[in-house]
Amino acid sequence: METDPMQTDFSFGTAKGAFPVVGHMRQLLRQPLEFLEALSGVGDLVEIRLGTRRAYVACHPQLVRHMLTDSRLYDKEDTRLEAAQEKYGDSLATASRDRHRKLRRILQPAFDHTSLEKYSALLEQEIEALAGHWRRGQVLDVFPEFRDFATRAVSRTLFPDHIGEETLKEIQCLFRSMGGAGRQGAVSRLTGLLRGMGGSRQQRQILQELGAVLDRVTAECRLGGTQGTYLLSTLFADGGRGDDDRGPTDTEIRAQALSLLAAGSHTVAATLTWTFHLLSQHPGIEGRLHEEVDSVLGGRPARWEHLSGLAFTARVLTEALRLYPPVWLLMRYTTGDMRLAGRHLPRGSTLLLSPLAVQRRADIFAGPRDFDPDRWLPHRAAAYPRGAFVAFGAGAHKCIGDSFGMIEATLTLATITQRWQLRHAPGVNLRPELFALAVHPRNLPMRVHARRHNRR
């Protein structure tokens, strides 16, 4: 039996309030932010119930980091991966350990500094279009607005020369439908997520239609040539070939594209949604943001070369990610019997990891619910323990697109806030809506106001 590999005295606790039959699933679905945040006060490792099944939530940063980085002891469950692969295909998000390592090595060059700079030109075009079509006094449902934008943005970086306007609109429409189809019953949503096979018949149909669109674009890409820099370009290069020296199949390309689309649309949209919600409540911070973007941009849209000067803008986003991490729940399983936090965990025990359980800990972050971007000043951030901020995960499974997403969000936030302010309109419902990866407000209507220097 494995013992505590870190030789640390972690505390163990059991969450109260389990309901008959469903256990704590009701709290996870109705009040996920509050429920997960509160668990750190129960223990460093907390037992909860998912129906009649026990699960253990890691609430200590050292535990969280260790579970994310040591796949020898904590891994993804094969049966859950198989179910997810059947639905989404064999992608970086659903691959088992060895396959994941290979795919990561193939795709990583597509996210290097040089490639990110080239993608930024495509992102800038979409950001300008987004900011340009808003009008003073308009009321926006913020999350769908940013989801449509982010879907377009990531779609254009998949195959820039082979995705035209009609195809972009088709992909956007399918993602909108996917969001509507995701509103299933509470228990079935979480059960499906935990088993890796969430999704209604309607969702599966939408995925098939989306896959067909991506297959069509892949075929056009093969006919038109595969030169250039785009998110999937490395799959067509020599590094994308398998041991049999064959190139990737259309099915393999579709799986990677689906994975990147899902991650790049909902998570960026949720981050921007929560950020504008927070800014509307903190005019002092918004004022500092305006000062920076006005000084750095000088009336121009944000560009790649401006990123180094947008330090406060980046801190605003990082703080929003701390308070409202889009990826709200990750899962691992013990690969063998072990003893952790004084508790015997048999092989196959379910471990849940949520950034919320560590990123709002009062013993790490002073005023944990306060919106304080300056807590990410370098000298302050350096004092936080490793594992205290895991909005992008950690280790080999850390989000491969973390830099891409931060660049996109920073350019978007700077460009929009130079022109517009968003304020809550009637009908706000901040109750979290859970959709696979992302958690976002159920309904956040906001009215568009022109900045004083930009009155129309």
Image (cartoon, grey):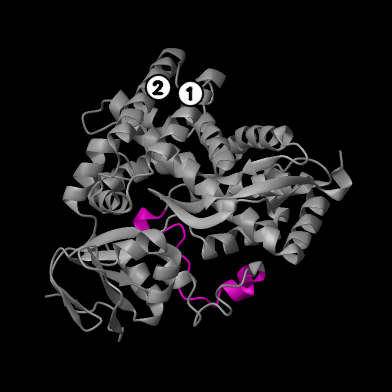
The answer to whether residue 114 is visible is no
In the image, residue 219 above or below residue 245:
above
Pointer 1 or 2: first along the chain? 1
Mark drawn on residue 213: 2
In the image, residue 120 above or below residue 228:
below
Q: As drawn, which residue projects farthest toward the top?
A: 223
Residue 22: x %, y % from top left: 24, 62
The question of residue 210 being in magenta is answered with no
Q: Residues within 10 Å of mark 2 (few under 14, many from 20)?
A: some
Residue wearing tag 1: 170
Q: In the image, what residue occupies the spot 32% across and 27% down?
A: 208
- Between the C-alphas of marks 1 and 2, the distance is 8 Å
Using the image as rendered, state which of residue 265 and residue 339 is in the foreground.
265
Residue 57: x %, y % from top left: 31, 70
Q: Are marks 1 and 2 in contact (CB under 8 Å)?
A: yes
Using the image as rendered, state which of residue 114 and residue 219 is in the foreground.
219
Residue 222: x %, y % from top left: 40, 17
Mark 2 element type:
helix
Disc 2 residue type (three-letter): Val
Q: Residues within 10 Å of mark 1 (few under 14, many from 20)?
A: some
Q: Quadrant of residue 319?
A: bottom right
Mark 1 element type:
helix
The N terminus: image quadrant: bottom left
Residue 435: x %, y % from top left: 41, 47
Q: In the image, what residue occupies the spot 53% across and 24% down?
A: 169
Query: Magenta stretch mostly in which secondary structure?
Result: loop
Q: Which residues are magenta?
A: 374-398
